[in-house]
Image (cartoon, rainbow, N blue to C red):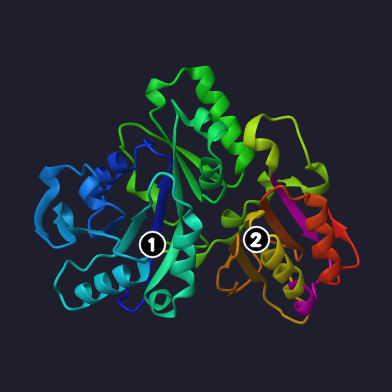
Amino acid sequence: MDTDAPLPVTLLTGFLGSGKTTLLNQVVRRLPRTAILMNEFGAVALDHQLLQEMDGPMALLSGGCVCCTISGSLSPTLKNLWMARKNGDIPAFERAIIETTGIADPTAVLDNLLHDPWVRARFRLDGVITLVDALFGMGQLDAHFEAVKQVAVADRLFLTKTDLAPADSLAALRARLTELNPGADIVTVTHGDIDPAAIRNLGLWNADTQKLEAARWLNPQRYRPARASPFGGTPAGHDTRIRAFSVVLDEALDRFGLTAALDMLLSFRAENLLRFKAIVHVRDEPLPVVLHGVQHVLYPETRLDAWPDDERRSRFVFIVRDLDPAFVEKLLAEFAGAAAGSLAP
């Protein structure tokens, strides 16, 4: 392991009762050398047989895992963990999982991870996993927009308690999750039993292959083109307010114009912009630029070593709330100086 490389961080979220603690009990057993950060450790029923020793807000768990409470903001907790690891006071964990409360907005955690320079130099966000209860998930999505937002920002969705849900209800829930977040793979979890590989390599960087896997990460083919995703719709509940769509622009984009368009979206429509990803052809820049944002949080810009395919077009995918896809497409095309936009195939 490269001891100087930033450690991967997985954000684990999901509505109340979705099975996060059950999953974490399995992670402790099956994925050693993991640091698990919880908002309320004392109230969480981690298997007592896994606890080896308790020292203030930190516990050593079986398999060389570490569990601690998030004290105040996230940054001091991560700094304390890193220093304890460096000093040899705790096992040299290789990854971290941050578990949010059931009604938490994941954006605040993402903001903390990406905008604290000290933390960002030592930890990298691998991705967001959202657990969805197969038995009660449909009702939670209907009643609580927090549940919808947790689904929208996920890189991967874990569907729990599938053994308790009727087959027709389960199929309807899967279809709804795919509509809300087309780019996220849906993984079935039974009794918290999960292949450890399912919680790794969620983002652009694949630690196993040591490569940036842009095509897998963006998944533009799963999204409807902007003009085929009209504002308004027929689904019930909160879903009428959510749109997942793609924008493809043929011509190389002006850097200043692209920045202006994104600044406008982030400054004035951040609450509406749940998530976006993009591989962009910037004028006079030979290599593609990767952009990624969640509401007001913009991830650090990344450049690929090469285009992921023969296409040299800019490709964006969006998940928005109460925002007309045609408006977003027009804003990008006009501000970025593209003479014409084309729809995703």
Which of the two residues, 251 or 309, is positioned nearer the viewer here?
Answer: 251
| Amino acid at pointer 1 | Val
Q: Is residue 176 above or below residue 251?
A: above
As helix, strand or loop, the secondary structure at mark 2 comes to: loop
Q: Is residue 220 above or below residue 251?
A: above
Residue ID for mark 2: 270
Sequence order check, earlier mark of 1 and 2: 1
Is 298 displayed left or right of 231 in the figure?
Answer: left
Considering every residue shown, the one lying at the far left of the view is 53
Q: Quadrant of the N terminus?
A: bottom left
Is 68 displayed left or right of 186 in the figure?
Answer: left
For the magenta stretch, what is the residue range? 243-258
The residue lying at 39 percent from left, 36 percent from top is 18
Marks 1 and 2: CB-CB under 8 Å? no
| Amino acid at pointer 2 | Ala
Which of the two residues, 221 or 338, is positioned nearer the viewer here?
Answer: 338
Residue ID for mark 1: 9
Q: Picture quarter containing residue 26?
A: top left
